[in-house]
Image: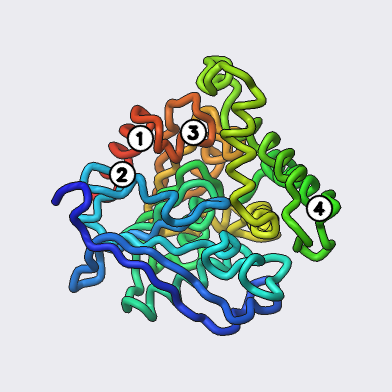
Amino acid sequence: MDDMDWPRATGSLDLGDLPLRGGGVLRDARLAWRSHGRLNAARDNVVLYPTSYSAHGADLEWLIGPEGVLDPGRWFIVIPEMFGNGVSSSPSNAEGYPALVTAWDNVAAQVLLLREVWGITRLHAVYGWSMGAQQAYHWAAAYPEAVARAVVVCGSARTAVHNRIFLKSLMAVLEAAPEYDGAGGFSTPPRLALRAFGRIYATMALSQDFYRAGLHGGGDLDTYLHDGWEARYHQRHAADLLAQLRCWEAGDIAPGGDLPAALAAITARVLLMPGETDLYFRVADNAAELAHLRAGRLVPIPSIWGHRAGNPATTPPDAAFLRAMVRDFLL
C-alpha cells in the first residue's frame, strides 16, 4: 500500500431530533463523517477519531497513512465531525442551534452513527487530540463496554479551572462584539472581535519556550499574528466558535459529581499523552487522573510546542514520538 492507496469515504447521517443530556433537543441533527481503510468482517478493527476545536475532519487527516500515527491498512478509521464545527449541525447551518451541545451529546450521536451506518458496537480504540481527547474520555466513561482503548492526547476528563478562564476570555471577546445578537449568533462577521480572538489564542496554544526559541519566525510580530492566527479564525463562523467554546468549557466525565469514581469506572486501557509545555491540558491534570484509572499510562510528549505538540503536522520529531507511542499502544 502506497501513501494514497486505501479506501476513503465521506457521508452524513440524519439523526432527527437528538435529545440533549442537559435538556432540550438538537433539531434535525446531522452528523457528518469521513472514513479511511476497510472494516473487517468481525468489525473489530475500528478506531474512532473525533475532531477538535474549530477543526474539520480534513484538517486532521495528516496523521493517517501507512507510515502515519494511524495506519489505514490495519485500522478502519472513522472521523465524526463534531457538532458546532460547521460541517455537522452547527449554528452556521442549523436554525435554532441550542445554547449548549456537550461532549456527551457528541458521543451519543457517534454511537448512533457507528451502529446505523456500519453495525459497529465496539471500538478497538478511540483516539483524540484536544476536544477530540475530551470526547475519547467521555466515550470511555459513558460506554465502558464498547471501548477497549482510549488515546487521550492533550486532553483531560474535566476542563480545569485555568483552562475555563482562558475559554471565558475568548467567549467574552465574541460576546462583546457589536455584531453579537445576545443569543449565540452574529448579524455580520465580527472582524475586530475575531482579530482579538486570534491574538489571545496565540498566547495559549504555544508555550513560552516556543516563543523564546524564536520558532514563530522571529520577524514582525504583527505579521505573525495576522498570518498565523487572525486569518485562521476569520475562516470560521463566529457563532460556531462560540458554540464549541461552550462545549469545551463544559467538558466533564462526571458533571457536578465524583470525578475519581468516574475515572475508576473506566475499564478501557487509557494512554494519556499531555504535552510537557501545554498550557491548556497540563501534565499535572493527567497525573492526578492516572491515580484513579484502572489501566492508565502517562507518557508526556517532550516538546516545547505547547498544545500543538499533540497535533504535530509540521514538527516531525513530535510526530515520530506520537507515532511510536500510539502504534505500540494499539497492538
Q: CA distance from mark 4 to mark 2?
A: 38 Å
Q: CA distance from mark 2 to mark 1?
A: 8 Å
Secondary structure category for the residue under label 2 = loop
Left or right: 203 with respect to 213? right
Residue 203 horizontal/vertical position (percent): 65, 30
Residue type for callout 3 = Gly
Residue type for callout 1 = Ala
- Up the image or down, 15 lies above or below 65; here it is below
Residue 285 visible in this rendered orientation of the protein? yes
Disc 3 + disc 1, Cβ < 8 Å:
no
Q: CA distance from mark 2 to mark 3?
A: 16 Å
Secondary structure category for the residue under label 3 = loop
The mark closer to the camera, 2 or 3, is: 2
Residue type for callout 4 = Glu
* Picture residue at 37% right of the left edge, 50% below the top: 61
Residue type for callout 2 = Val
Q: CA distance from mark 4 to mark 1?
A: 36 Å
Disc 2 + disc 1, Cβ < 8 Å:
yes
* Picture residue at 54% right of the left edge, 28% below the top: 277
